[in-house]
Amino acid sequence: MTALRFGYGTNGLGDHRLDEALEVIAGLGYTGVALTLDRGHLDPYAPGLSRRLARTRRRLTALGLGVVVETGARYLLDPWRKHAPTLLDSEPEGRARRLGLLRRAVGIAADLEAEAVSFWSGTPEPGMHHDEAFRHLQDGCAAVVEAAGLVGVRLGFEPEPGMLIADLDGYERLRESLGNPAAFGLTLDIGHCRCLEPFPPDECVRRAAPWLVNVQIEDMRRGVHEHLEFGEGEIDFPPVLAALTEVGYRGLVSVELPRHGHSGPRTAARSLDALRAASAHPWTADAVRRVRADPASLAALFPVAARHTGAEAGEAVRAQLLQALPGSAPERAAALEALYRRGDAAERLAVLRALPLLDQDGALGPTALPLIADALRTNDVRLVTAATGPYAARYLDQPAWRQAVLKCVFMGIPLAAVAGLARRTDTELMRMFTAFAAERTAAGRPVPDDLLTQLDLHDTGERHAHL
């Protein structure tokens, strides 16, 4: 059975810089991101787009995040009117502006190797006849389909409550009117299914399966278009997630909570916990209960998790077991150390990668730093990469952190994988980078591109021509 791939929407982390939003998403254990093009997150109209796209692509790859491009920014095209103009605009200039954004999004998706571009219809202007609005939408969608076909990008059209195309019936009519193009897929929002579709959300999944390229997920109540945290609405999620597995869906299932940026990391953590619990293998649910009741059982359950739940789900299941572990920070740290010392490489990776999740609100503190130190002494690329994640960025002292970053350079680990690089880089680290680059150049060996990028980003005017 294939494990579902959970993502989180950057519009729910709007108070974070993009690099740090990606760090939070990956650090919590998500494997994907729904990236909304907006002023604060990969502004598609700001200067240096190609350079920023290349940097973002490296970051996504280094963090192991799949990506879907979302185009629902509220005021990107007009500072006064939310989501305006749309493909339904009465003025050709307005429709052209929206179409220009969607074409640009398709190009961005191609550069990012994104899994899909998601977009919606918009709402007809007052007095506009339905047939006129539908013709405008047909024309716009046909143009977007053509652009997507040229670069091999999949589109995910999203039915949105209150818009011209609000439900699956509307999507199917629109798709048929376009000639059923292969590139014109579907974005299904599970909350919207509960809000207005006549069938339960799991039945909506089965109906949507032939065209499904993107899934958004949150809780919601019948008749109320309000994105809620899991457990605050009316949706029964296990059948929904089981239906996605049943139909063989392989794309991202991304949490869509755009009004929760004020509590972004906590909300993201709670959401992933809820999704993992709702999709848990029966063995996992039983094992979590056993660990809560008897912490000593973790020693026997942790190593065999992947055997019972599958290799794809193994690390996520181990994270759930670690989260279930009761006790004080020192007690939990001792248990983590025992698992790490006795574990194979996969088990050690699971412990290291779970540290940011276990340290929410400082729950662990620096008690697990000995594990980071041990991993950094190895020559295992996977362990060193995991050891330079968000937990190390939070607790390693500056000299130790600098040495960890330099070890990544020596080992060829992409600097894009290092958590906290932008906020923790200082003059001394730049001196170390410069010295390393000079040594490589003197020896006639190439300087890593990402190190040169760091030198450029922190250039003081002297640049690095002497290298």
Image: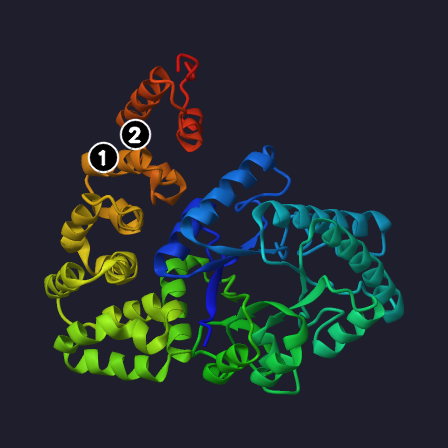
Assign the N terminus to one quadrant of the image. bottom left
At 63% from the left edge and 48% from the top edge, which residue is drawn?
A: 110
- In the rendered image, the vertical position of residue 428 relative to residue 132, given as above or below: above
Query: Is 94 placed above or below 28 here?
Result: above
* Left or right position of 352 against 152: left
In the figure, is residue 423 to the left or right of 10?
A: left
Q: Tell me if I can see residue 87 in this picture.
A: no
Residue 92: x and y, percent? 86, 50
Which residue is identified by label 2?
426
Q: Which amino acid does label 1 sit on?
A: Gln
The residue lying toward the viewer, choosing from 186 and 36, is 186
Q: In which quarter of the image is residue 286?
A: bottom left
Q: Which mark is residue 403?
A: 1
The C terminus sits in image quarter: top left
Residue 159 x %, y %:
68, 70
Tell me the SS state at disc 1.
helix
Residue 269 image-quadrant placement: bottom left
